[in-house]
C-alpha cells in the first residue's frame, strides 16, 4: 500500500514542503520514503475549511435555529438539532456515538498534521522536577522518595529530546513525543520535546480533581477525553516506542496494557522500555511470574530495563536502524539533527538516497 506525506523544510508551520511517497510495511512497523517533489504549500489550520457545497451547512443551521421565535415548541429540548443538543448527546443511549466522536476528533487532527508515528511516555504525575517540592507527598518518607525520583524527570526530558531530534529529521511526521498531558513525568516528556522546538501531543482525561494540561503541550495537539478506552487507543495506535517511568496505578495499567497486547500479538512488537531497573525490580517480580508458569519464560524479553535516556534511545535506534542523533541538535542548536542521514541541496530540500550500510528505512535526511 502506498500513501503520500508532506515534509516541512524549516519547521512545523513552514511553507516549503517535500512530498514523499511511502510503501507501508505493517509487519515491520517501518516505512520506506521515495522522493516525489518539492513545492510551496501553506498549511491550513486543522479543521478550519470545508469543501465547497451547494447545501446549507450544519453551522448555518445551528445559528438559524437559535434565531427561531421563542414559543413553547421551540423552547422544548425536542426541537433542538440533535447534534447541537447537549442533553441528547450526553444521554446513555448515545454512548456509542460519544465513543466514536472521541476516537474521531484526535484522529482527524493527527491525520491533518500528517503525524504517522509517536513515542509514548508513561510515568508518575507525582514525580517533581529536580529542585521542586514533592507536592503530592503525604508523609516525610514519601517526600524523600518522590524528590529522589526527580532523576526520572530529567531522564524523561532527555529521552524526549533525543526522540524529538529524530522527529525533526523526519519533519515531525514520525516519532512525535506523546504523553498523558499532565504533570510529573508527562510534563517532562512534553518539555523535552519543547526544548528542541518539536510539536508534542498531550492526551488528557477528565478527572474528579482539577486538572489542566501542562504548559509544554502543543496547544493544537492538546486533547481531552472522557473515556479511558478511546484515550488508550490513541496512545498505542501510532506508537513506535513506549517508555515507562516509575509511577502508580495508572502507569502500571498503561504498561500492562501495552505488554499484554504485544504478548498476545494483538500489537506488533515495539521497543517497550522500563526506566529505573531498581524501582521495577522492587515493584514487580517478573521472574516469580515466569517461575510460577503464569507467563512464558521468554515473556520477560518483551521489554527492556534501562536507567538512562541514552541507553533507552539506543535500543529504539537499533530496533528501527535509525541514524545516530547529533548531540548539538538534540539540545536545540541549529545544526543537522542526524549524523549520516542523507544530503542537503543548496536550497535546503530533503534528498533521499539508498545507503548500503543500512536498510532503506529513514535513509532520508533533511
Image: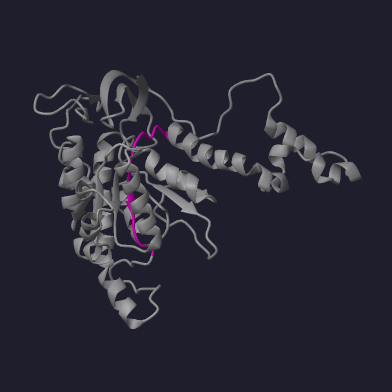
Q: Is residue 12 above or below residue 364?
A: below
Residue 204 vs residue 168: left or right? right
Q: Residue furthest right?
A: 71
On the image, the x and y values in percent for residue 231 come to 46, 47
Kindly indicate the quadrant of the structure image that contains residue 124: bottom left
Q: Quadrant of residue 234?
A: top left
- Residue 37 percent coordinates (x, y): 31, 18
Q: Is residue 246 above or below residue 137?
A: above
Q: Nearest the camera: 158 or 267?
A: 267
The answer to whether one can see residue 271 in this image is: yes
Q: Position of residue 143 (x, y in %)?
A: 33, 77
User: Relative to 145, is 179 on the left or the right?
Assistant: right
Looking at the rendered structure, the number of numbered marks drawn on it comes to: 0
Q: Quadrant of the C terminus?
A: top left
| Coloration of the structure image | one colour
Residue 40, position in %: x, y?
A: 38, 23
The residue lying at 88 percent from left, 40 percent from top is: 69
Classify 267 as above or below 348. below
Depth order, front residue of 247/136: 247
- Residue at the extreme front: 293
Q: Residue furthest bottom?
A: 140
Residue at position x 48%, y 31% from top?
Answer: 44
Between residues 201 and 299, which one lies in front from this camera angle?
Answer: 299
Does the stretch in magenta take in 104? no
Q: Does residue 7 sit above or below 143 in this rendering?
A: above
Rendered residue at 18%/36% (across/down): 322
Q: Nearer the viewer, residue 211 or 19?
A: 211
Q: Which residues are magenta?
A: 113-125
Is any atom of residue 332 visible in this view?
A: no
Quadrant location, the N terminus: top left
Q: Residue visible at 21% across and 43% down?
A: 316
Amino acid at each position: 500500500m502506498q500513501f503520500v506525506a508532506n515534509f516541512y523544510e524549516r519547521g512545523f508551520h513552514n511553507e516549503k514542503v517535500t512530498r514523499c511517497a511511502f510503501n507501508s510495511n505493517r509487519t515491520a512497523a517501518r516505512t520506506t520514503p521515495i522522493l516525489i517533489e518539492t513545492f510551496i504549500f501553506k498549511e491550513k489550520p486543522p479543521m478550519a475549511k470545508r469543501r465547497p457545497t451547494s447545501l446549507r451547512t450544519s453551522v448555518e443551521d445551528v445559528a438559524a435555529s437559535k434565531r427561531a421565535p421563542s414559543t413553547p415548541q421551540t423552547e422544548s429540548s425536542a426541537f433542538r438539532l440533535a447534534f447541537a443538543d447537549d442533553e441528547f448527546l450526553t444521554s446513555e443511549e448515545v454512548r456509542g456515538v460519544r465513543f466514536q466522536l472521541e476516537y474521531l476528533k484526535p484522529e482527524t487532527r493527527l491525520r491533518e498534521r500528517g503525524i504517522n508515528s509517536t513515542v509514548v511516555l508513561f510515568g508518575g504525575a507525582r514525580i517533581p522536577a529536580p529542585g521542586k517540592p514533592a507536592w503530592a507527598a503525604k508523609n516525610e518518607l514519601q517526600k524523600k522518595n518522590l524528590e529522589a525520583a526527580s532523576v526520572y524527570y530529567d531522564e524523561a526530558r532527555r529521552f524526549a529530546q533525543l526522540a524529538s531530534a529524530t522527529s525533526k529529521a523526519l519533519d515531525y511526521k514520525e516519532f512525535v513525543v506523546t504523553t498523558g498531558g499532565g504533570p510529573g513525568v508527562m510534563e517532562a516528556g512534553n518539555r523535552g520535546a519543547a526544548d528542541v522546538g518539536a510539536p508534542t501531543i498531550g492526551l488528557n482525561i477528565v478527572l474528579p480533581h482539577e486538572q489542566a494540561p501542562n504548559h509544554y503541550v502543543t496547544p493544537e495537539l492538546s486533547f481531552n477525553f472522557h473515556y479511558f478506552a478511546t484515550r488508550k487507543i490513541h496512545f498505542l495506535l501510532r506508537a513506535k516506542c513506549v517508555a515507562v517511568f516509575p509511577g502508580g496505578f495508572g502507569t502500571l495499567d498503561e504498561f500492562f496494557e501495552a505488554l499484554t497486547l504485544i504478548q498476545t500479538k494483538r500489537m506488533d512488537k515495539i521497543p517497550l522500555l522500563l526506566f529505573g531497573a531498581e524501582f521495577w525490580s522492587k515493584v514487580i517480580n517478573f521472574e516469580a511470574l515466569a517461575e510460577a508458569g503464569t507467563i512464558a519464560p521468554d515473556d520477560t524479553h518483551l521489554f527492556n530495563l534501562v536507567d538512562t535516556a541514552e541507553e533507552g534511545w539506543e535500543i529504539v535506534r537499533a530496533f528501527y536502524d535509525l541514524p545516530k542523533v547529533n548531540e548539538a541538535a538534540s539540545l536545540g542548536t541549529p545544526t543537522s539533527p542526524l549524523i549520516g542521514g542523507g544530503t542537503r541541496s543548496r536550497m535546503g530540500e530533503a534528498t533521499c538516497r539508498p545507503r548500503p550500510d543500512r536498510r532503506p528505512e529513514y535513509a532520508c535526511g533533511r
